[in-house]
Image (cartoon, coloured by chain):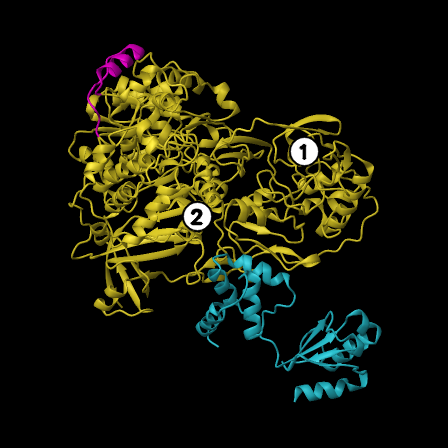
Amino acid sequence: MSEQKIKDEINKILSSPTDGTVTVLSCLLLVQDEIGYIPDEAVEEIASFLKTSINEVWGVATFYTNFRFTPPCKNILEVCWGPTCHLKGAPDLISGFLDKLNLEEEGDSKDKDVSVRYNTCLGACQQAPVISINHSLRGNVKVSEISNIIDFVAD
Amino acid sequence: MVVRDTKVKLKIDGIEVEADPGQNVLQAALDAGLYIPYLCYYPGMKSFGACRMCLVKVEQPGPDGVMKPLPGAPASCTTPVAEGMVVTTNLKETKDLRKGIMELLISEHPHGCLTCHRIDLCGPSDICLRHVSVNDRCVTCPKNERCELKDTVRYMEMDLDTPLTYNNRNLPLEVKDPLWDMDMNLCIVCGRCVRICSEIRGDNALTFISRSGRSLIGTSNGGSLLESGCEFCGACIDVCPTGALVEKDFKWDKPSKIVKSICPHCPVGCELKMEIDKKNRLIRSVGNLEGPANKGQLCFRGKFGLNFVNDNNRITKPLIRVNGELVETTFKNAISVVANNLNKYSGKEFAALISPTATNEDAYVLQKFTRLIMGSNNIDVSSNVVPEITDEIFRMTGIPGSSSSIWDLEHSKSIMIVSSNLTEKQNVLGVPIKKAIDNGAKLVVIDQRETELTRFAAKWLKPKYGTELHLIAGMIKVILDEVLDDHDFIEQYTLGIQDLKKSLWSFDIINVSNISGVSVEDIREAARIIGNDSPAGILYALELLPSQLRAECTKALVNLALVTGSLGRDSGGIFPLFDGANEQGIKDVGCSNTFLPGYRLISDNSSINYFQDVWGSNLNNSSGIPLGQFNREVFSGQIKALMTIGENATLINGNDSEFKESIAKLDFFVTTDYSNNEITSLADVIFPAAVFSEKSGTFTNIEKRIQFIRPGMTSKDEVSEDWYTLIQIAKAMGSSKFEYKSSEEIFSDISNEVSMYSDISYDLLDKEGIVWTPNSWSELFSDKKSENSTNNQDILLKFDPINFTDDIEVITSKEFPYLLVQGRVLFDEELSNVKLENGRYKSQTNPVFDLHPEDASKLGIVEGQTIEVISQENKIQGIVGLKSTQPGVVSHKSMFGDLINQLQISKNFQVSKNTDLNLVPISIKKL
C-alpha cells in the first residue's frame, strides 16, 4: 500500500463511529484490529486526529506488548503459557513450535507464514495445553502433533 | 499572586515547619532547609512518585484528634501536608527501604564512581588506572563530579563495598542530534525530562518508551528531535539527574565557578547560571529556578547560543584608521583621537546609537554624553525600529511598555496574539501562555502565517494584508454591542469611552468581514472569547502589518484591553513585543530622541530645566532625529559624526544595506564592539567592548523588571565596559561631570534622576529583580485612593478613537505581485524530511511554497511543480503546495530546526539577530 493509501485507510478507520470514550488506546486498537499492525502513518494520523503529539501515541503503543509495528504473518499461532497449560506441558509445546519454525523467541517465521505469540491465558484451562490458530482454539495439544499443525497452517 | 494567609503547621524530624496548604511534605521540608533524598521530584513540576527515594513515616491526627500513622511508608512528594502532621524522615526502617530501592536502581547504572575505593583519594586530574573497568569509570561520565544520582547515593551512606551484579544495557550512544548527546545506559527513567517537556514546555517531544524493566526515554519510533516537535530549549538537560542527557559543547568540562546573570538575547530577561571554567570560558548556561522572569526556563538561544563570548576573534585592542587601514593602538591614544575628532562637531551633527544588549548604566552614560557634551538629542536604541507599539500605550495609559508581569499571563482567562512569532523571538513568554492554555484559557491568534502557537489556538484568524485594524476594531464593536465590556472597570479607571463608541457607531461587522476576508461568525466568536473570558493577555509585535497601520492598530489593541478591563489586574495585560534585550531599560534611562531620562519630554521646559540643574549645564531643547530617519539625515549631510555602542548596533529589522551605505558617508564614525563585522570595518575608531558575561550592571526586561547582570568572566587586554570607555572620552573632552568609578555609582545617579528607579539600589537588586510601576498606576489602582486622585483626570486611562485609513501602502508591484509570508512550526509531517548525514541529523527539505488555488490556476501551476520565487534580492526554488490562506499570499513554512542549522553554522552573534519573518513582495516563475 502507498503511504497516502494507508493514511486514507487509517482516517476512515478513525472516523468510523465508535462507542464510548475515544482515547489514544482505543484508536490504536481500532487500527490494529483493522489492519493487523500499527504502521508509522497511524502514529501520525492518530496524533493529529486526537490533537496530541506523536510521542504521546508512541509511548502508549510501546507500553502494550500486544501492538505490533510490522505487518503480521499470514497466520497467527498463539501458545498459552498460563499456569494450567504450563503444568500440563506448555513449555515443551513452545520449544517444539519454536524448533519447528527455527525461532529463538516468539516472533515471525522467516518465510512470513506464521507469527508465534505467547498468550497468558486463552481461557480454556480444562483442555490444557491450549493453542489458538488464527483465533480458533485447539485443546489437548500433544508435542507429537506439532509438525502436523505447522504443515497444516503453512499450507 | 494568590495570597494565602493560612499556613499549615507540621513537624518534620522534630522541627516545627510552616507550609502552604496544598504543598507536599517534600516541598515543605526543602523549603524549611531539611533534606529528604529525591530523584524524580523537581521543583516547579507536579509530583510523580516514581523513584521512591523520599519515603518517610507519617503520623496524622484523625477526625477524633488521635494520632494515626499513615499505612506503609508514603512518598513525601505525593503526601500533602496536614495540620498537626508528624513526619519522620530518618528512621532506620525507611532508610533501609530507600537503600533497597536504590540498589535496584543502580543495578542498571554504571557505578564505578560509587564503589571504587579511590573515590575520595583521587585528585581532579588523576589518571584512572585499573580499579574500575573502562566503561564504568567516573572519568568516562560527562556528569562526573556534578551528578545528582551520585550525590544522592553517597548521602544515603550505602554499603557498596561488594559490587552488585550490574547489568550494562549496552545501548549505543545517541549523538545524532545537533546540540546534545543522549546516553541511555546512564538513564534511571525518573521521567523528569519527559515531564518538563510536556508539563512545563507543552511540547511533548520526549516520551517513555516500552514498559517495566525495558522502559526508557525516547522519541516516536526513534526519530530525530527535529521531527518530534522539539523546540531545543534544553530544559530536559537541565533537569537530568544523571549523565544521560548532556550538552555537546564543553561536554566534559567542569565549571570552576557559577555566576548568575541575565540572558542578552531577548527582552524576556531569563536569569541563567553561567558556568565558567578555569580557562575563563563560558561552558554552560542553566536556567535559574529562582529567576523571577523565567522560573528556570531558557530557550535555544539562551541555552546553546551564548558561545559567542568565547570567540577567539574578539577585538581586544583599540583600533584606529591610519591611511585607510585599521591599526592597533593604545587605549589612551584612541581616546585622544576620538576626543579631538568629536570636538569638531556639536548639536545635530552628532548622533549616537546603542545596542539593545547594553546595560542601563552604559545607556545612561551615553545619553548624558550625547546631551551634555555633544549638545545633541539624536540618540536611540538600534532595535527601536517600531517605536509605535510602545509609544501609543504610553500616550493612552501612561505606561511605557507592558502593563503586567510575564507570569501574570499564566492566570489569564484568554490570550490574544497579533502578528507575532513569539515562541521564536521571545520564546520563554510561550511557557506561561502554554500553561494558561493547559489550564483552560482560550487563545486567539491573528496572523496570516502558521506559527508554533497557532496549533494551540481556539481561533486562528487570517485577515488579508493590511486589514488587521478593521478586524480588531470589529472585535471591539462586537464586545460593545453584545455588552461583554467590563463596565465597572471602564467607569472607574478610564476616560473617553463615548468617543470610542461614537467612532464605531456606523461601523459594520459585515463590512469588516468583507474587507478582511474573515467570516462574521469567526469575528464574533473571537470577540466573545476575549470579551467573556477577561482579563485577557494581549500580545503583539505587528510584524506583518503595513508600517502606517501599526500606530492605529496599537491604539485599537489598547482600546480592546481597556474595554475588557484587562489592565492593572493580576492576570492578563498588554504586551508590546519588541526585540531588544534591554530596550525597555535603555529607553527608561533616556536613550530616546524625544524623552529625557524617566520619560520626561524634551519639549517640556520643566524637564529641561530639571536636568540643566542636575547636570549643571545647558541642554539642547529640540527633539532629535527619529531612528527611522537616521540614514536620510546622514545622506543629506546633517549628521556628520556617529557613535555606536555595544555589539553590532545596527538597525535590527531595518534596512542594513542602506545603513552601511550611509555610514560610509560619515565624516567620523566611532564604535565599540566585541568582534569584527561589516559595521566595524567602516569605523574610524573601534574600542573593544565587553560582552554581557564580563559586565556588571542592570537590564530591564519586557515586564519592566530591573535585574542584575554579574561579571563571570574576566576581560582580556584592553576590553572594557562601554560606560568606562565613554567616561574616558568625556574626560578627554574636558568634562568633569563624568566622575564615575563603578557602575553602582552610575546607577545611584539613575535612581536619583529617573523617578521609576528611585529607592532601588544594587543591594536590593542583588536579592531579586524589581518590577517598576509608574506612579500614576500605583495611584490609580491603589485600594485607598485619596480624594485628590479620583478627581485627577490625568492618571485615568484614556480611550482613543480609531482612525481608519484606506491609504495602505501597497508593497506589491507589477513586477512583484505576490506577498511571501514566512512562518515556522515545530512539527509538520510534510516538512519533516530528516536524514542522517555523517552520523548527524539534518533536515533536508525542499522549500514548499503554498499558493492559493486561485492564484495557482491563474498561473497554470499545479501542486508538486517546481517554481522559482523571486524577490528583489534573492531567488529560491521550491515545490508548489496549495494551502495558502488567501489569494495573493504565498506562504512558506519551515521547521523550527532550520534555525538550529543556522545556529550551528554561525560562529558569530548571528543568533541574536532575529531572522526576519516579514512580508516580502515576490514574483513567481514556472520552471
Residue at x-position 57% and y-position 62%: A25
The chain coloured cyan is A
Please tell me the numbered disc located at residue B903: 2
Residue B655 in the image: state x and y as whole percent.
26, 42
Image side of residue B221 versus residue B453, left or right: right
Three-letter code for the amino acid on which mark 2 is drawn: Leu
Whether residue B331 is visible to the viewer of this picture, yes or no, is no
User: What is the chain letter for disc 2?
Assistant: B
Q: Which image quarter: residue B288?
A: top right
Up the image or down, B425 lies above or below B280; here it is: below
Image side of residue B397 versus residue B46, left or right: left
Which element type, helix, strand or loop, lies under badge 1? loop
Residue at x-position 32% and y-position 20%: B790
Q: Which image quarter: residue B546?
A: top left
Three-letter code for the amino acid on which mark 1 is drawn: Ala
The chain coloured yellow is B
Residue at x-position 77% and y-position 81%: A139
Q: Nearer the viewer, residue B824 or B309?
A: B824
Q: Which residue is mark 1?
A: B82
Whether residue B317 is visible to the viewer of this picture, yes or no, is yes
| B56 is within the stretch colored magenta | no
Up the image or down, B500 lies above or below B855; here it is: above
Which stretch is magenta?
B603-625
Up the image or down, A131 lies above or below B400; here it is: below
Label 2 vs label 1: CA separation? Answer: 50 Å
Which element type, helix, strand or loop, lies under badge 2? helix
Q: Which image quarter: residue A78?
A: bottom right
